[in-house]
Image (cartoon, grey):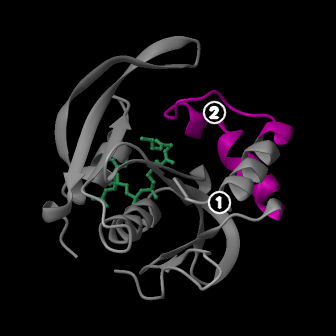
Amino acid sequence: MTTTEPTAPDGEVSLTGQRTRLREFVSADGAAAYSIVGDDRVTKFLSFDSRSPAAAQEMIDGAVQRSKSQPRNEFYLAMTQLDDDGLIGFCRLALTGVKAAKLGYAVAAAHWGRGYASDAVSIMLGYAFGSLSLHRVTAAIGPDNAASQAVVEKLGFVREGVLRDHVFTNGAWRDSVLYSLLHDEWAT
Ligand SMILES: CC(C)(COP(=O)(O)OP(=O)(O)OC[C@H]1O[C@@H](n2cnc3c(N)ncnc32)[C@H](O)[C@@H]1OP(=O)(O)O)[C@@H](O)C(=O)NCCC(=O)NCCS
């Protein structure tokens, strides 16, 4: 459940859930971002290989820049704990097609298993189907990524099928399982 105003007058998004907050990235998040996207335990399940500190900083700076574009077609947000503004993960909604978006997320390995991803995805879905009035949100998840599949299944996503050789990562092509959630299936 979202407990704060989703969009400030300056357009910045800040969403607060039961365990996490999603806020706009700032350039200073670069070092903490490296501890996530530079960690093979995390990137094993993402669509890109582990990044260097410089590439992690570039990723954050790019997200900060894109967050200012209008119309905005990407909500790439930093995930923090409620009582600490430090970055522990990210959640991304990329608008695509008609009233649709692709969802992505990751949590630093040190924080796995505490319900952060479930909470962050839940508040992002509230924003997607509420403020953004989207109709369909999809998530493409590696067939072996049981934790991520558990996150979306708990939130009501429906398994649609397999995208063959969907991403090239860790030196090989990898299938994805495509999940979707429609507006009317989202329980607020
Ligand atoms: C997927 C990921 C984001 C989950 O983050 P998290 O904060 O640990 O997730 P949560 O604690 O909210 O929930 C994880 C759920 O997966 C379950 N889970 C964890 N490992 C599991 C496994 N091996 N098999 C089955 N379920 C598993 C947990 O039990 C939990 O479900 P529950 O709440 O019903 O008990 C995290 O593992 C991660 O960053 N992985 C690498 C990046 C990634 O995979 N991103 C998603 C790409 S699609």
Q: Residue furthest left?
A: 184
Q: Which residue is mark 2?
A: 40
* Residue drawn at x 69%, y 76% as measured from the top left: 85
Residue occupied by mark 1? 67
* Contact between labelled residues 1 and 2, with CB atoms less than 8 Å apart: no
* 30 and 131: which is toward the camera: 131
Question: Label 2's element?
Answer: helix
Which residue is found at the position 38% from the left and 67% from the top? 132
Query: Label 2 is placed on what type of residue?
Result: Asp
Q: Is residue 140 magenta?
A: no
Q: Is residue 43 magenta?
A: yes
Residue 56: x, y in percent?
A: 76, 43
Of 6 and 139, nearer the camera is 6
Question: Amino acid under label 1?
Answer: Ser
Q: Quadrant of residue 183?
A: bottom left
What's the residue at 73%, 34% (across, down)? Answer: 51
Which region of the structure is painted magenta?
28-55
Which label number is shown at residue 3? none
Residue 171 location (% of width, % of height): 58, 12
Q: Main secondary structure of the magenta part?
A: helix
The image shows residue 44, relative to residue 1, as above or below, that is: above
Q: Is residue 94 left or right of residue 2?
A: right
